[in-house]
Image (tube, grey):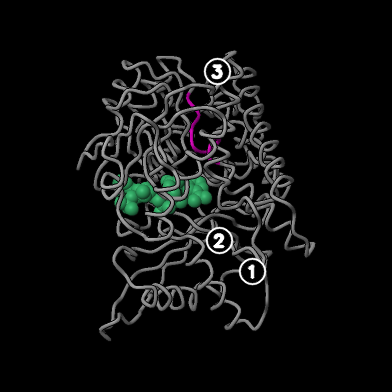
Amino acid sequence: MAVLGEKIEAIYQQVKARNPGEEEFHQAVKEVLESLGPVLVKYPDFAEQRIIERICEPERQIIFRVPWQDDKGQVQINRGFRVEFNSALGPYKGGIRFHPSVYLGIIKFLGFEQIFKNALTGMPIGGGKGGSDFDPKGKSSNEIMRFCQSFMTELARHLGEHTDVPAGDIGVGGREIGYMFGQYKRITNRYESGVLTGKGIGWGGSLVRTEATGYGTVFFVREMLKARKNSLEGKTCVVSGSGNVAIYTIEKLNQLGAKVIACSDSNGIIVHEKGIDLALVKTLKEVERRRIADYASYHKDAKYIAGGNIWEVPCEIAFPSATQNEINGKDAKTLVKNGCIAVGEGANMPTTPEGVKVFLDAKIAYGPGKAANAGGVATSALEMQQNASRDSWSFEFTEKKLDEIMTGIHATAWETAEEFGASGNYVLGANIGGFIKVARAMVAHGLI
Ligand code: NDP
């Protein structure tokens, strides 16, 4: 990684001192700051206005108690978060994560990344993120509902279609969005469709939103390969995770002629050389909410490796689609050694800084999450557009828009990298491309 210039290093040290112990947030900030040196040279007013310092400080951070009752009648307490990071380009926008690992540092890293990702989409949305340390695993549907209702009872006062618009993330899918929307409607006495995205079809949701992050990541990788006069056709791929992003990454890869031979969950990996049976994964994960280990009992030629490392499965293209820091330096070296030519990050910050360096040094096509997985939030913005005009678009029309947006994000990241003398470096291209859009709006809005 590049060394930070003196001024930027001082900003980074201040961020660390002001946000002690929030390692994921420090990592996300450092990665962006490392790209910004040349921007301050080209746009001195950004330095005068202290735009970087202001961008690193969330506009508002909300932390709250979430009390709920389990099926045994026992009282449980969790902690809820919403970080409203930046509203220069539009209402705060970003998902809600339910996972036991959630704490302020995770929500801040995600919210920070979201600012630049959302700017890259070209849609009028600011950056935010929320969540709770609630663990949905093993909970009944009634427990999930009671938790979501309690979570929204407090969060509702901070939201609004023009203020802050959450969506799903790890542990939060259509079911949870439904429970939260119902509670918001009950508390506010308003049918405010645009206050949450990822809603069900038939009550304000958009076609393609469920598929959008996975499909969008594949479109981004298709563009990276096109820029290298290559294609997805016939490529062997590995996709980590088996949740929303992983499932629809596999679906689009299959449609575009690639073959996915492995996927995973947090307990282990499935390797199926014939090609992953997507219909089975959907049934196990989306309908029956079971573990990926069960896949092997339906296909005798598939192998389940408990605790296995998916990055050791040789592939041409890797799609990390589970969680942050899932590819370390050693994994990245293994991937490159085994002939990996491209990485499309469906997850947020799935590669450690050491891993990113390996990919950049090897000059493979490396699409960082804030560019590659922006299709989810972009389609959320399309959902907001449909809600505002009380309209609903066809699947084909919406998917075409998603494709155009992803192609546009690729072009912005590619061209920005060229302009700043780092040809093919999508990390630099995405960071600078997103930053400039937000910085210009912040300067225009004055000191607020
Ligand atoms: P889901 O909850 O649907 O699926 C997450 C998957 O990743 C599951 O298979 C889960 O396995 C696995 N996983 C989660 N945490 C860990 C962990 N600590 N170690 C190993 N595996 C883990 O979430 P999504 O598919 O929605 O999100 C996946 C990633 O994509 C996240 O980084 C998210 O921020 C990012 N993303 C999601 C968007 C969306 O629209 N949903 C948009 C943009 C980015 P298990 O069931 O065992 O926990």
As drawn, 254 above or below 70: above
Q: Are marks 3 and 2 in contact (CB under 8 Å)?
A: no
Sequence-wise first label, 2 or 1: 1
Quarter-of-image position of residue 77: bottom left
User: Residues under labels 1 and 3: Cα distance?
Assistant: 39 Å
Image-based side of 199 in relation to 171, left or right = right
Report whether the residue tagged 1 is closer than 8 Å to ligand 1: no
Report whether the residue tagged 2 is closer than 8 Å to ligand 1: no
Sequence-wise first label, 3 or 2: 2
User: Residues under labels 3 and 2: Cα distance?
Assistant: 33 Å
**From the image, which quarter does the N terminus lie in?**
top left
The residue under label 2 is which amino acid type? Pro
Q: Is residue 380 visible?
A: yes
User: Residues under labels 2 and 1: Cα distance?
Assistant: 9 Å
The residue under label 1 is which amino acid type? Gly
Query: Label 3's element?
Result: loop
Report whether the residue tagged 3 is closer than 8 Å to ligand 1: no
Q: Which residues are magenta?
A: 366-373
Foreground residue among 376 and 271: 271
Q: Is residue 311 magenta?
A: no
Q: Which residue is mark 1?
A: 160
Foreground residue among 384 and 246: 246
As drawn, the label of residue 166 is 2
As drawn, 414 above or below 152: above
The x, y position of residue 60, in whole percent, is: 52, 61
Query: Label 2's element?
Result: strand
The x, y position of residue 293, in whole percent, is: 26, 48
Q: Which residue is mark 3?
A: 424
